[in-house]
Amino acid sequence: MKHVKRYHSQQLVAGGKRLLVEGPIEPERLASLRFDEGLKAFRVPEEQHKALVEIAALPEGRIIVAREEDLVLGYVTFLYPDPLERWSQAQLPDLLELGAIEVSQAVRGGGVAKTMLQVAFADDAMEDYIVITTEYYWHWDLKGTGLDVWQYRKVMEKVMGSVGMVWMATDDPEICSHPANCLMARIGRRVPPESIAAFDAMRFQNRYFY
Ligand SMILES: CC(C)(COP(=O)(O)OP(=O)(O)OC[C@H]1O[C@@H](n2cnc3c(N)ncnc32)[C@H](O)[C@@H]1OP(=O)(O)O)[C@@H](O)C(=O)NCCC(=O)NCCS
């Protein structure tokens, strides 16, 4: 499958800062930007910056950033699912995982996450993919936001729902291990029925027949 990446951008003001939301961004360009100290939800900022540059260089990888001049204050990643996760079993060339979305404290609650997703899905190429996100409450910044798991789950539903990602049932044990965890997905308009069937088969693997 040829991974077409068409650049889009949008401006917004959040937390009093004028931001440019743009991408998919080239790895060299991303490497030349600075990464805000507040982007520490998943790794220390410099390590996360490096990891994002690597993802941007992958044939299927897509990174959208929100930046104030050369300072990155938010990002979202799309890439193939981790080979250790069930979502990679069928090796679907048209299934991408929204791996991480993060916005720095200073500009949270200002629509940055929703705008980054709008920019990501402004590329018509996204209609060729099933995009999934696995939401585990232990990845959420409960401490930093002061939200409880259900309030946070609501925020994630709003963020993901803003681009048509919807909750989908699965018997994946990690997702089922806590009721606030969930699988969300968006199936692009041009995804063929065979890919959807293969995705459905990956969602349910513990069916019993009587
Ligand atoms: C989750 C996260 C990405 C949201 O980013 P954000 O830029 O603040 O989100 P937005 O401003 O686009 O808000 C989306 C919606 O959630 C609401 N929201 C966001 N933060 C909220 C909060 N702390 N309390 C209540 N509502 C909140 C917004 O009001 C908005 O609602 P609306 O659609 O009704 O207008 C951000 O909090 C973050 O980086 N968290 C740490 C990393 C993380 O948990 N990532 C998710 C797992 S990969």
Image (cartoon, rainbow, N blue to C red):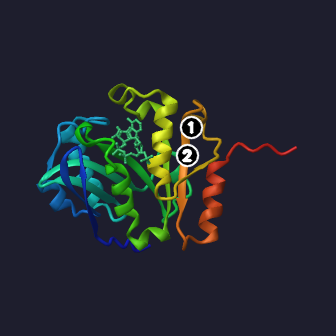
Residue type marked 2 = Leu
Q: Measured along the vertical axis of the image, is residue 185 above or below residue 4?
A: above
Image mark for residue 75:
none
Q: Quadrant of the C terminus?
A: top right
Q: Residue at x 29, y 50 (%)?
A: 75
Whether residue 83 is visible here, answered yes or no, is no
Q: Residue at x 60, y 57 (%)?
A: 199
The residue to which callout 2 is attached is: 183
Q: Residue at x 61, y 49 (%)?
A: 168
Residue type marked 1 = Ile
Q: Quadrant of the N terminus?
A: bottom left
User: In terms of depth relative to the viewer, which is nearer, 40 or 156?
Assistant: 156
Calculate the distance from the C-alpha at mark 2 to the C-alpha at mark 1: 7 Å
User: In terms of depth relative to the viewer, which is nearer, 107 or 6?
Assistant: 107
Q: Which label's residue is closer to the chain start, 2 or 1?
A: 1
Do the residues bearing badges 2 and 1 touch, measured as CB atoms within 8 Å?
Answer: yes
Whether residue 190 is visible here, answered yes or no, is yes
Q: Measured along the vertical axis of the image, is residue 146 above or below residue 34?
A: above
Q: Residues within 10 Å of mark 2 (few under 14, many from 20)?
A: some
Image mark for residue 175:
1
Q: Position of residue 69 (x, y in %)?
A: 12, 55
Residue 105 located left or right of residue 69: right
Distance from mark 1 CB to nearest ligand 1 atom below 8 Å: no
Q: Position of residue 126 (x, y in %)?
A: 44, 67
Q: Residue at x 54, y 49 (%)?
A: 184
At mark 2, the secondary structure is strand
Q: Measured along the vertical axis of the image, is residue 174 above or below residue 54?
A: above
Q: Position of residue 125 (x, y in %)?
A: 42, 72
At mark 1, the secondary structure is helix
